[in-house]
Amino acid sequence: MQILTDAQKLMAKMALVVLLAIGLFASGWVVKGWADDSEARRIEQAIAKTREISNNVAASAIAGITVTNTTIQGKVIEHVRTETIYTECKHSPETYQLIKDAFK
């Protein structure tokens, strides 16, 4: 039977501690992933619920719109100006006549 030296026992304990630390780290990583997935699922559910509520509110608002068709019957008022008079005209009478001729 082989007897382990103190140095070998110490190395074995250190290896065991390192393996335990790695295992705890890995399991913490997995649990963190589960928590992140759970948070993402809660966010997705909140988005879906908000979308459903907004769609229902929009549908209710659209359903509340009443369409009214109205035919307006009345006279068409047509006003045709036959002679344009420039009230603030600063042109000479000859230029004024040229302007009037251009609009004919």
Image: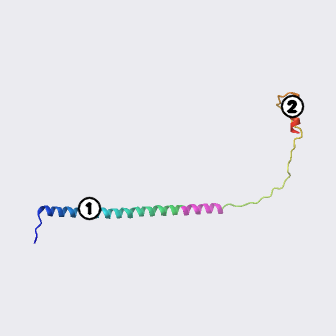
Is residue 53 highlighted in magenta? yes
Q: Nearer the viewer, residue 63 or 101?
A: 101
Is residue 95 highlighted in magenta? no
Q: Where, by quadrant of the figure, is residue 58 drawn?
A: bottom right
Disc 2 marks which amino acid?
Tyr
The residue sitting at 25% across, 64% down in the picture is 20
Percent across and percent down for residue 70 are: 78, 58
Q: Is residue 3 toward the left or the right of residue 40 in the image?
A: left
User: Quick one: label 1, few (<14), some, or many (20+) residues within 10 Å?
Assistant: few
Vertical arrangement, residue 56 with respect to residue 92, above or below: below
Spatial CA span between label 1 and label 2? 102 Å
Figure colour scheme: rainbow
Vertical arrangement, residue 78 with respect to residue 24, above or below: above
> Mark 2 or mark 1, which is nearer the start of the sequence?
1
Percent across and percent down for residue 39 are: 42, 61
Q: Nearer the viewer, residue 10 or 39?
A: 10
The residue sitting at 52% across, 63% down in the picture is 49
- For mark 1, what is the residue? 21
The residue sitting at 38% across, 63% down in the picture is 33
Magenta segment boundaries in residue numbering? 51-63
Secondary structure found at label 2: helix
- For mark 2, what is the residue? 96
Vertical arrangement, residue 75 with respect to residue 100, above or below: below
Q: Is residue 33 toward the left or the right of residue 57 in the image?
A: left
Image quarter (top left, top right, bottom left or bottom right) of the N terminus: bottom left
Percent across and percent down for residue 57 are: 59, 61
State the residue lying farthest toward the bottom: 1
Secondary structure found at label 1: helix
